[in-house]
Image: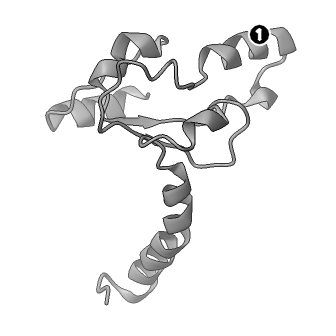
Amino acid sequence: MPDPIKADLSSKGTIVRETADLGEVIDNVDVLYMTRIQRERFPDPVEYQKVASSYRITPESLAGSQQNLIIMHPLPRVDEISPSVDDSSHARYFQQSFYGVPVRMALLKMLLEGDQVD
């Protein structure tokens, strides 16, 4: 995460912790925002596989998580969230996708017509 964003969040009292090991923090996370590992940014396929497999959410990796944890993802996903997580109470990415269009419509309306939303 870029330093200016971390500084802004910290100035507002938000705790920011970066880690490469989800297991270190899963018990303290309220919202887990996942994105896909972008294969096209890796010149070496072996390196991509190594990184991609270390950032995969499974029911086992969620053991010890808070009951109210929510998982978000912009979709489509590749293999970073196991389909077996879809039915868990944590999965919110389908709702996120469903509400994405009306939210973008409201934002465009605000930008184009002023800040009044009906």
Residue 11 falls left or right of residue 101: left
**Residue depicted at x 57% and y 43%:** 86
Rendered residue at 30%/20% (across/down): 27
> Is residue 44 among what the camera can see?
no
- Where residue 113 sits, quadrant-wise, is bottom left
Q: Is residue 57 above or below residue 53?
A: below
Disc 1 marks which residue?
47
Is 97 left or right of 67, judged from the image as shown?
Answer: right
Q: Does 116 sit left or right of 33 as displayed?
A: left
Foreground pick, 102 / 86: 86
Percent across and percent down for residue 12 are 15, 38
Mark 1 neighbour class, 10 Å CA radius: few under 14, some 14 to 19, many 20 or more: few
Is residue 40 or residue 3 the one in the foreground? 40
Q: Position of residue 66 (x, y in %)?
A: 30, 29
Amino acid at pointer 1: Glu
Q: In the rendered view of the protein, which quadrant contains the C terminus? A: bottom left
Q: Residue at x 42, y 19 (%)?
A: 63
Taking depth in this image into account, of 79 and 105 the one nearest to the observer is 79
Q: Position of residue 28 (x, y in %)?
A: 27, 23
- In the rendered view, does 74 fall on the left or right side of 77? left
The quadrant in which the N terminus is found is top left
**Numbered disc 1: secondary structure:** helix
Is residue 77 in view?
A: yes
Vertical comparison of 118 with 30: above or below? below
Residue 41 image-quadrant placement: top right
The x, y position of residue 30, in whole percent, is 30, 35
Q: In the depicted view, which residue is nearer to us: 113 or 73?
A: 73
